[in-house]
Structure formats: C-alpha cells, structure tokens
Image (cartoon, rainbow, N blue to C red):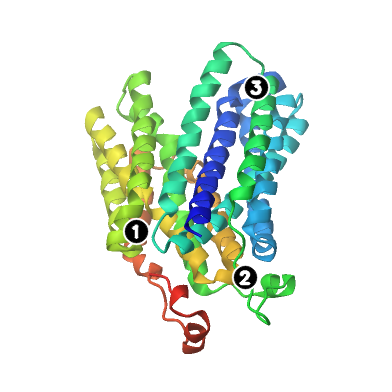
Amino acid sequence: MERSLLSGRLATFAYFTLNGFLMGMWIVHIPAVEHRVGISHAVLGWLLLLLGAGAFAGMQLVGPLTDRFGARTVVPVSAALCSAAVVLPGLATSAWALGAALLVLGFGNGCLDVSMNAHAVQVERGYGRPVMSAFHATFSIGGVLAALVGARTLSWEISPAVTLGAVALFGLAVAALAAPALLTPPAATPGLGVTTEAVTGRTTPRRIWILAALALMLMLCEGVANDWSVLHLRDTLDAPAATAALAYGAFATAMTVGRLLADRVAARYGPVAVLRHGASTAAYGMAVAALSPWTPLALIGWTVFGIGLSGCIPQLFSAAGHADQDAAGANVSRVAGLGYLGMLAGPAVIGPLTHVVPLNLTFFLPVAFCVLAACTAGILRTPPAPATAVSERGAGGQER
C-alpha cells in the first residue's frame, strides 16, 4: 500500500508539472502567435478571455465526472486533452481560429486542474498529513521549465506550430506513462455509492462557497502580482526594465519556495495557522511594496508577499477536497473555478482603478483581501462530524 501511495504521489507530481509546463509553453509563445495571426494587443486581450471561459467550463464539468468515475480515469484523459490542445494556437491563422483554439485549450486546462487536484486530495488523505502545497510548487516548476525550453526554441527561430506540436506529443506520452500509477478510487460502500444524479443534485454546502470566495480573493492577489508587479517598479519607481523584471521573479521564486515548505508548516501548526499568518504576511509585504519609495525595498515587499501567499491557496483546495469524500471533485471545482475567475479579474480590477488613484495605491485592495482572509481563516477548521458519520467512517476517515 505504501509503495502504491508513493507511486500515486509521484504521478501527481508529474501531472502538476506537466500542467505548468503546457500552460507555460503557451504563454512564452503568445507574442509569436499574436504576430503570426496578425492581431492587436486589444484583440488578443479579448481572445484570452475565451481561455478563461473554457477553463471555467471545464472545471465545472469535470468536478462531478471525477466524483463519478474517479480521478484515476479522468486525470489522464484531461491531461491528454490539454496536451493535444496546446498545439492548436500555433496552428491558428485567424482571430476566429485562435479564439476557438484558446477555448479548447482553456477547457482542457480546467479539466486537468480540477481532476489532478482531486487526486492530490486522495493522495493527501492516504498520507494522513499535508502534501498539497508541494504539488502546487511543481506546477510553478513546470512553468520555469517551459520558460527555459521556450526561450531556447524561440532563439532557434523554430515556429510555434512545430514547438507546440512537439510539446503536445511529449504531454500525451507523460499522460499515458503516469496513468497506471494513479490511485484507484476508494471502494464504494454498498448502498452508499455515488450516482450521477446524487452528484449533480447535491447542494453545495455554504462552507464550500466561503472557501471559494476566499480563493477568488487570494488568487486575484496572485493575478495582481503576475500582471502588475513589473509595471509597478517600472512606472512608479522608474526602475530600469531589467530591474523591474526582478519584481515578478522575486514573487514567483518566493511562491515556489514557500509552497515547497508549506506542507511541513501545515503539518506542525495546522492549515488555519498557515492561512492566517500567511495572508497576514502577504498583506504586510504588499503594503511595503506599495508604499516603498526605493526599488530594493519594493523588491523585498514583493518577495514577502509571495512567501505569505504561497501556502494559502493549497489549504483552501485541500479543505474543499476533504469536506466530503464523495463530492471531492465537485467541491474542488467550485473553489478552483471561482479562484480562476479571481486570477483573471486581477488586471480587470486594477486597470480601471488606476484612473482614480496611482497604481501603487490600488494595491491596497489586495491588502484588504489578504486581511479579510486572515480574519476568516477559522473556516479551515474541520467541522464536527455527525455521530452517525463518525461511526460509519471510523477513525481513519477523520481529517487532522
């Protein structure tokens, strides 16, 4: 059992890394694809909304399917779909074709995102201790690998279609090779099996919606760092372009390192402490970055912001997955779906605010969201289970 659990964990690492690598390869090829299709930045911005729409649709669809058929079945199919779809933007020759390609790619990404997180919850349940944050760290590592590989292929002037085609074949191979190591779904108790009607007709608990709202706010904060950290140093502090780029690099590195360490912190102090102190630290770091008149201090602020934020989202995903074993996929899809919308909303919210206040002052909206998350961290405490549920599940079903 321990060997199969370890194999399942390694397979989950593979799928998270693959997901980060696939999306990273698309991101580094955005300028080349934009040039090939011949569209403006404004049109590209609208088309990228289709990527988000496809991801949200995929998340909502695949959650119940994961509960119905098991992550062992859904994860490889989702990974294969996302891998095959990554080549489509490279083949597009018109705005309409690119829009359709991004819709399909987003759908595949959403399916893989939810299903692999649902399997990560299953692995974490098997270990009986926090392991979720490390999975999210490998997603970031996949993005770093994509940046390195993409930079090299672009320097060789290889067309996006060829590069992304090779990436698609690589992704299909990984999806197939890692599949046998995935864990089998928990055996259904006679009379208590999950039917399609039960899953789709289940009412989402209020606690799940609160977790989803927190995910929306915190992933909006992450989106702000992704889209505005470099511009903050460039426009507000007049930093050179090369120095300004360090803002995102500092944030992303801190996020990756923090997620590699967050599981140990959560195991020792609990998920509530990780969210409460992590969100508080993130609020402090963002406030320092926003108010700093000096570039080095602003870089420190973005680093602290990344460290604080790093462990928060994995705790929300984990809590959603553990809330109800029979509806783990559906619950994760709610949290991931709203969180993804928050990520997309970052630039949409901050941009208009810059017409009212300076860019650095708009960052106090993420500060407020982090403070709110810290104040409501108690939602991660496992609610007491009914006596009947405890007797049916036994001590092994309890979440720490």
Q: Position of residue 80 (x, y in %)?
A: 69, 41
Q: Which residue is mark 1?
A: 275
Q: Eyeballing the image, is 197 above or below 131? A: below
**Tag 2 or tag 1, which sits nearer the N-term?**
2
Q: Is residue 343 left or right of residue 273?
A: right
Local crowd at mark 2 within 10 Å, few (<14), some, or many (≥20)? few
Q: Which residue is mark 3?
A: 163
Q: Which residue is mark 2?
A: 187
- Kind of residue at badge 3: Thr
Q: CA distance from mark 1 to mark 3?
A: 39 Å
Which numbered disc, 1 or 3, marks the residue closer to the eye? 3
| Location of residue 14 (image quadrant) | top right
Which numbered disc, 1 or 2, marks the residue closer to the eye? 2
Q: CA distance from mark 1 to mark 2?
A: 32 Å
Most foreground residue, 90 or 170? 170
Q: Is residue 221 left or right of residue 91?
A: left
**Tag 2 or tag 3, which sits nearer the N-term?**
3
Q: Secondary structure at mark 3?
A: helix
- Kind of residue at badge 2: Ala
| Location of residue 184 (image quadrant) | bottom right
Q: Eyeballing the image, is 325 above or below 124? A: below
Is residue 103 visible in the rendered structure shown here?
no
- Kind of residue at badge 1: Leu
Q: Secondary structure at mark 1?
A: helix
Most foreground residue, 400 or 219? 400
Q: Eyeballing the image, is 135 above or below 169? A: below
Is residue 5 visible in the rendered structure shown here?
yes
